[in-house]
Amino acid sequence: MTLSFQTQHSNHVRGGFTLVELLVVIAIIGLLIGMLLPAVQAARGAAQRMQCQNHFRQLAIATHNYHDVHQELPAESYFDPDPEKYKEFVETDRIDEAHTSFRMRLLPFIEQAAILGNELESIEDYALIPVSGFFCPSNSRRLVDLPNYAADRYASHYYGVAGAIGYDPAGKFYQTDPRQKNVAVGPSILGPFANTGTIIIGGEVSICSITDGTSNTFLFGEISWSDYGAHYNWVRGTVISNARGITALSSSKGIAQNLPINAGKTHETLKLVLEPDGMEYDVPVRGRAAGHGVGGFGSNHVGGTNFARADGSVHFYSDATDTTLLMYMSTRNGGETVSP
């Protein structure tokens, strides 16, 4: 008996995807990634903003602890106007202990006192050491970004608020530091240097002297947006770089009307009134010529930047915040009406 076998294929056996099906799958994956990416970026941005605000809170707490010990807020720097005393530093573009920033004074209060135990050739060599609490996580650039200047040293994204600069809408002209006598020297705009705020040259600002109220007064702000181009190392406070005396306010900045948050992202210069005669200056807001006394506050956070107030609270201010409010919040005893 002969047996015969007949193989019948009732169903077509597929060997894989067709090109059309593969393209459809790829398109679906691409669509899902496109939908997911903004959410991931938003979550990352929110996390960076929260971490930045935590840095501000730690600095604010440290500032209050410093005040408890010294009965004043940390000075932006100290300054002796005698050019002979500091001739060496003028000629070498170095600083001494008096010209270090408020950040140096806060190191023992942010658990970084060990940094001061290093024996270094120059005070500015402390800036070879990074301090994570001085950086906004939204900006990966942490080194000095001034062309041809100490590029191996670390900067900071957080600055003291020295006060208001220029006129307010009511016609009030804000007092500035008399030791900075020249607003313009050659092509540079050097100041003036505000001293109506909380972190100023010479210090001597106590919590009790903030008569506008600590909840209505800025303590710190951030300048962390990319391409600012005027971040000195974190050690520097007032800079002495020529025989005319102080020429740059490096760790604290004033706030001028018509200089909004994140203005530097879209402007090279802005016209600002800096003197009582009402004269307008074209003030650089990015690059080495920027930031001598007027702060281009802003960040890489979407839509605004963080400020810490003198009561220790931290708040996010949008790009659209009225510059008059920023000026009013930058003074400690201006008597302005503020609704932050």
Image (spheres, rainbow, N blue to C red):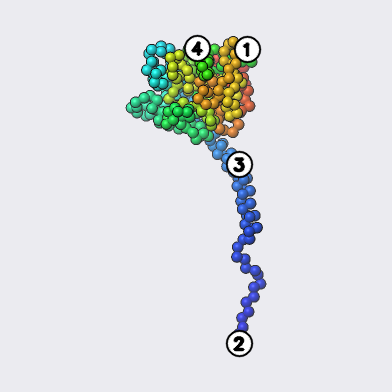
Which picture quadrant has residue 92? Answer: top left
For badge 4, the amino acid type reads Lys
Separation of residues labelled 4 and 1 (CA atoms): 22 Å
| Residue 213 in sight from this viewpoint | no
Q: What residue is disc 2 on?
A: 2
- Residue at the spot of label 4: 181
Q: Quadrant of residue 120?
A: top left
Mark 2 or mark 4: which comes first in sequence?
2
**Which residue is labeled 3 in the image?**
38
Closest to the observer, 93 or 217: 93
The crowding category of the residue bearing disc 4, from other C-alpha atoms within 10 Å (few below 14, some 14 to 19, many at least 20), is some
Q: Residue at x 61, y 83 (%)?
A: 4
Query: Can the viewer see residue 91 in this picture?
Result: yes
Instruction: Look at label 2 and name its amino acid.
Output: Thr
Task: Tell which circle, 1 or 2, labels the residue nearer the N-terminal end.
Answer: 2
Q: Amino acid at mark 1?
A: Gly
Callout 1: SS:
loop
Secondary element type, mark 2: loop
Residue 171, label in figure: 1
User: Is 85 situated left or right of 174 in this image?
Assistant: left
Of the 4 image quadrants, the one containing the C terminus is top right
Q: Earlier in the sequence, mark 4 or mark 3?
A: 3
Placement of the N terminus among the 4 image quadrants: bottom right
**Towards the viewer: 252 or 60:** 252
Taking depth in this image into account, of 204 and 78 the one nearest to the observer is 78
Q: CA distance from mark 1 to mark 3?
A: 45 Å
Distance from Cα at disc 1 to Cα at disc 2: 116 Å
The one nearer the camera, 44 or 275, is 275
Disc 3 residue type (three-letter)? Pro
Residue most toward the bottom? 1
Q: Earlier in the sequence, mark 4 or mark 1?
A: 1
